[in-house]
Image (cartoon, rainbow, N blue to C red):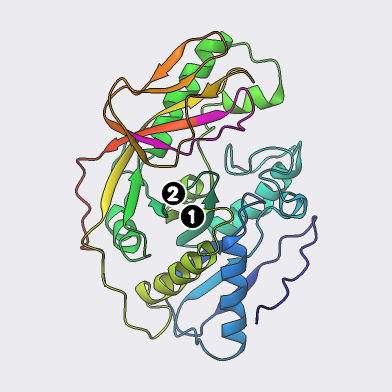
Amino acid sequence: MSMPSPTYATDTLRVHALRSLARGPRLIVLGAVHGNETCGTRAIERVLREFDAGLWRLARGSVSFVPVANPLAYQRGQRIGERNLNRNLRPSAAPLDNEDRIANVLCPLLADHDVLLDLHSFHSPGEPFAMIGPPDNAGPLEPFAHARAEAALALRLGPRRIVEGWLETYATGVRNRLQRTQGNPSERTQLLNTDPSYGVGTTEYMRSRGGYAITLECGQHADPLAPEVAYRAIRHALAQLALVDEPPPPARDDFELLCLTEVTDRHHAGDRFVREWSSYQSVSAGEPIGERADGTVLRAPADGFIVFPNPNAQPGNEWFYFARRSARRLDDEGAR
C-alpha cells in the first residue's frame, strides 16, 4: 500500500537531515530539481519512512534529503517554475525569479556537503543512466580532484550506462548561441542560455565547491520503475559511502561509457524530428535526425547516439544532444 505524499509549500525547501555522532562523509540527495521529475521524490519519501521505522540506522557521517528541490515547479507539475533551476545555478545578491531564490538556499546547502546524488528522469523512452564529471584536471572550465571516488560511486548505483562531457558540451552550445544571436540576446531566457555558466547545475556547482556529484537519470518520467531505480541508488550510495553498516554493492563490469559531444537547440516551432527518437538510440553518420523550419536537414555528424530528444522543446532551448563512445577508462580504485 503506497503512502500519501506530503504537501510541499512553494516558498519553502523541506530538508530532512540525519547526523550521526560518528564522523564520516556528508551526502545530500535531491529530488524534483525539475518539477515533473518525481521519481526521486517518491524514493526519498520511501527512504525517510524506512529510517523512521528503524529499518535503517545512520552509522556515521550525515545525509540530507531534499525531496522537492523546486516546489513551485513540482506544484505545477512542470519542468520549471520560472526558468530551469539546473542551469546558471549560483547565489544571487538580487534574485529575479523563483529559481534564483531557490539557488540562494540550495547553493549553501550543497557547499556544506561532500557528495551529491541528484535524481532525475527524462522525456523520451530509454534506459536509466548516470552522468559524471571530467577526469581530474586543473583546467579553467571544470577543475576536479575526485574522479576516482565519483566513478566508484557511479559504477555502484545500478544503471549500466554512464555518460560524461556535460559542461564541455554546454560551453560549445553557449558559443553557438552567441554566434546565432550575434552577442545581442534580447530576453532574460536568452541572456541566461548565452551566459558562460549556463551549463552549471547542481552537480557542476557541487564540484566547484570541492565535492563530487552524480546526476542519475532514472528512466522516463512516467515509467513506474523509475522510483525503484532511484530508491536502489540511494541505498547503494549509503552503503558505498559507509554511512550505513551494509556491505558496499559490487561495481558493474558491464558498463557502457559515452561522451556527450554536441547540443542542438530548437530555433523555430516548425523545427521537427524526422521520426520519434528514444534517448540513446543509435544513429549512423549522415543519418537524418531532424529538419529545420526552412527545410535544412540535420544529420548525425558521426556514428553515435541521440540523447534527450525533446519534440516539445521551446524555441531557443535544447532540442537534442549527440553522444559518442568514450575512450576514457573508469578507475574503480576509489572503492572502499
Where residue 190 appears, as percent x and y from the top left, is 64, 22
x, y percent for residue 144: 34, 46
What segment carries the magenta color? 305-319
Q: Is residue 39 left or right of residue 173?
A: right
Q: Which residue is mark 2?
A: 126
Residue found at x 37% / y 84%: 246
Q: Amino acid at mark 1?
A: Gly
The answer to if 122 sits in the magenta stretch is: no
- Label 1 near label 2: C-beta < 8 Å? yes
The residue indicated by pointer 1 is: 219
Q: Where 87 falls versus 301 (above or below)? A: below
Quadrant containing the C terminus in the rendered view: bottom left
| Label 1: how many Cα within 10 Å (few below 14, some 14–19, many 20+) | many
Q: Is residue 307 above or below residue 336?
A: above
Image coordinates for residue 160, horizontal then vertical, percent: 31, 57
Q: Quadrant of the N terminus?
A: bottom right
Prevailing secondary structure of the magenta residues: loop
Q: Nearer the viewer, residue 56 or 205?
A: 56
> At x 55% / y 57%, what residue is drawn?
110
Q: Earlier in the sequence, mark 2 or mark 1?
A: 2
**Camera sees residue 211:** no
Q: Which residue sits at x=20%, y=63%?
A: 333
Write down the quadrant of residue 172 in the picture.
top left
* Residue at image location 66% in from the left, 78% down from the top: 2
Q: 286 and 148: which one is in front?
A: 286
